[in-house]
Amino acid sequence: MLKFVKNHLETIAGVEIYPILSLLIFFGFFVVLFWWVITAKKDYISKVSNIPLELDNQNESES
């Protein structure tokens, strides 16, 4: 199966750029995500981390 796909892809002109672009997109996404996590404000992180607890308390009070 892999031999068929590899042989078929070799006939396409310029196909070697796709793995490079995929790697760059993958790497870029995680660099941006890492940067966002490092620069996120502590108030925002604590607010977001308490959302499940607030929703649980609201559900208990409605019951």
Image: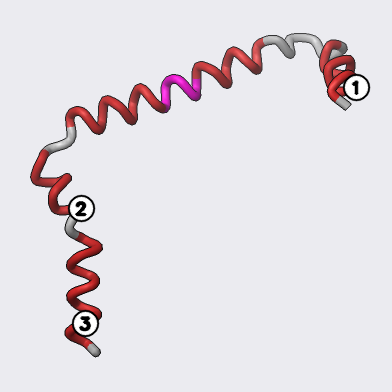
- Characterize the local packing of mark 3: few (<14), some (14-19) or many (20 or more) Cα atoms within 10 angstroms: few
Residue at the disc numbered 2: 48
- 51 is higher (above) or lower (below) than 33: below
Q: Secondary structure beneath disc 3?
A: helix
Residue 15, image x, y percentages: 74, 13
Screen quadrant of the N terminus: top right
In the rendering, which numbered label is found on residue 60?
Answer: 3
Q: Secondary structure beneath disc 1?
A: helix
Which comes before the other along the chain, label 3 or label 2?
2
| Residue at the image point whose x is 33% and y is 30% from the top | 33
Q: Which residues are magenta?
A: 25-29
Direction left: furthest residue: 43
- Characterize the local packing of mark 2: few (<14), some (14-19) or many (20 or more) Cα atoms within 10 angstroms: few
Residue at the disc numbered 1: 4
Q: Quadrant of residue 34?
A: top left
Residue 49, image x, y percentages: 20, 52
| Amino acid residing under circle 2 | Val
Q: Quadrant of residue 20?
A: top right
Left/right placement of residue 33 relative to residue 18 reads left
